[in-house]
Amino acid sequence: MATRKQFVVIGLGRFGGSVCKELVKLGNEVLAIDRDDKKVNDYAKYTTHAVVGDSTDENLLRSLGIRNFENVVVAIGDNIQASILTTLLLKESGVKNVCVKAKNDYHHKVLEKIGADKIVHPENDMGRRIAQQMSDENVIDFIELSDKYSIVELLASMKLEGKTLVELNIRASFGITILAIKQGETIDISPSPQYKISNKDLLIVIGQNDDIKRFEDQVM
């Protein structure tokens, strides 16, 4: 079973709000921060804890124990200055993984220079994809086909080392299909049932979200 994680999401616009919802849906704890009390009230039911506050206030971040969180998403919208200063304060506080929404290429370059760990330029529906990747270390990429179906890249663990596809019997056992397996720069489309999985292979699978999660929990 995937380990429950703790996240901070700063900024509750469309992107930040969708990240909050999906992280909580995936079983994580989420602290949300926004200057707008209406947004905080609107998203309180989708978070573990929601706070009205200014993320550029170092004292506020310290009072919330920000250094104790390993994962923070900075989803501040149009205020580039606030986004940059918040990111800088987070990295100076020792936050290990800071994912920041960038507004443009200039913003991106500045974020790179001050140490942002992941920089995204989200479309309206990117929040869910980012949440999936951050919440589960086995998920390398995630493409939502519908509310129920997805294509997911899963990183094979040591538990799968040396096992063949026919031995795992994935389609019959879990109802999902392995479309391809990527090993380094080599990709094997429609791999043979006799293919032996190696640690760190990328398994590209398609199926219902619940079935993919069940496969990951039971086999990965």
Image (tube, rainbow, N blue to C red):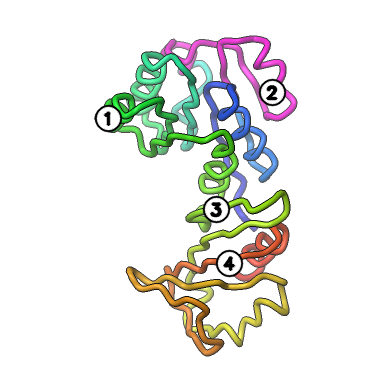
Q: Position of residue 214 (x, y in %)?
A: 70, 63
Residue 142 disc label: 3
Badge 1 element: helix
Asked if residue 68 is positioned above or below residue 192 in the image, the reply reads above
Are the residues at dot 1 and dot 4 in contact (C-beta closer than 8 Å)?
no
For label 2, count other residues whose C-alpha is less than 10 Å away and answer few (under 14), some (14-19) or many (20+): many
Which residue is label 2 attached to? Answer: 43
Q: Nearer the viewer, mark 2 or mark 1?
A: 1
Q: Nearer the viewer, mark 2 or mark 4?
A: 4
Please report the residue visible at 60 percent of the width from the left and 10 percent of the height from the top: 36
Badge 4 element: strand
- Comparing 25 with 218, the one in front is 25
Indicate whether residue 43 is drawn in magenta. Answer: yes
Q: Position of residue 172 (x, y in %)?
A: 72, 79
Please report the residue visible at 52 percent of the width from the left and 66 percent of the height from the top: 204
- Comparing 19 with 207, the one in front is 207
In which image quadrant can residue 178 be found? bottom right
Q: Which residues are magenta?
A: 32-61
